[in-house]
């Protein structure tokens, strides 16, 4: 497992939350900025893996911007069935359940993945979104996994 010290320093605040593995890193400019792609296995739903992509600022960009301790909380997510699906003891409320959280600043900002179960349509919904202490973020990404073949 490859770990990025600043980005993966925080981890999950809920018990049993998923850990991520870096599976890709794409350089986007000469300043050292990258897009990181990580895989996240849902800890309570066997057979579902999500991939999340997010922006990681390089040292030169941090020097130019003057903001050393923060990365953008923008992200993109896609989830898929990667084996037989077995649903464990998941939160079935409308609020869903946080599956993953990763810090984007020292204390105030993070990227989170929340799982919501749409029981009527037998679908798991994975929502990637920013969390900030002082203000919310409208930046979201959504992925669904159908359970139509699940026992």
Image (cartoon, rainbow, N blue to C red):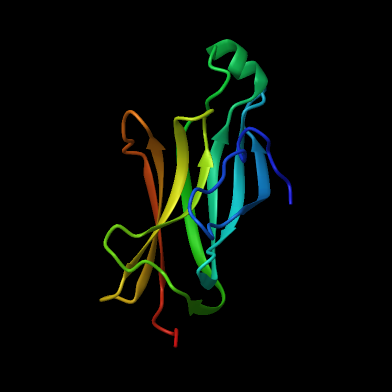
Q: Position of residue 98 (x, y in %)?
A: 43, 55
Residue 123 found in image quarter: bottom left
Q: Position of residue 48 (x, y in %)?
A: 53, 69
Q: Is residue 102 visible?
A: yes
Instruction: Choose between 9 and 113: the one closer to the eye.
Output: 9
Instruction: Choose between 34 and 39: the one closer to the eye.
Output: 39
Instruction: Choose between 22 and 27: the one closer to the eye.
Output: 22
Q: Position of residue 23 (x, y in %)?
A: 67, 51
Tell me which residue sits at (58%, 18%) in the image.
68
Q: Name above or below for residue 122 compared with residue 140.
A: below
Q: Name above or below for residue 28 compared with residue 43.
A: above
Q: Is residue 31 visible?
A: no
Left or right: residue 30 compared with residue 110? right
Residue at the far front: name it. 15
Left or right: residue 61 compared with residue 79? right
Tell me which residue sits at (57%, 57%) in the image.
40
Tell me which residue sits at (44%, 73%) in the image.
89
Q: Position of residue 116 (x, y in %)?
A: 35, 62
Tell me which residue sits at (37%, 66%) in the image.
91
Q: Name above or below for residue 131 compared with residue 65.
A: below
């Amino acid at each position: 497992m490859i770990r990025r010290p600043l980005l993966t320093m925080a981890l999950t605040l809920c018990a049993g939350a998923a850990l991520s593995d870096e599976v890709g890193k794409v350089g986007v400019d000469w300043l050292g900025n990258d897009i990181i792609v990580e895989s996240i296995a849902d800890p309570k739903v066997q057979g579902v893996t999500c991939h999340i992509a997010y922006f990681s600022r390089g040292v030169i960009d941090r020097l130019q911007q003057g903001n050393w301790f923060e990365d953008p909380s923008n992200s993109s997510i896609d989830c898929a069935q990667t084996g037989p699906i077995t649903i464990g003891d998941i939160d079935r409320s409308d609020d869903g359940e946080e599956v993953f959280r990763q810090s984007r600043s020292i204390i105030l900002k993070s990227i989170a993945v929340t799982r919501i179960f749409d029981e009527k349509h037998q679908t798991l919904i994975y929502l990637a979104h920013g969390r900030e202490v002082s203000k919310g973020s409208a930046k979201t990404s959504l992925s669904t996994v159908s359970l139509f073949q699940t026992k």
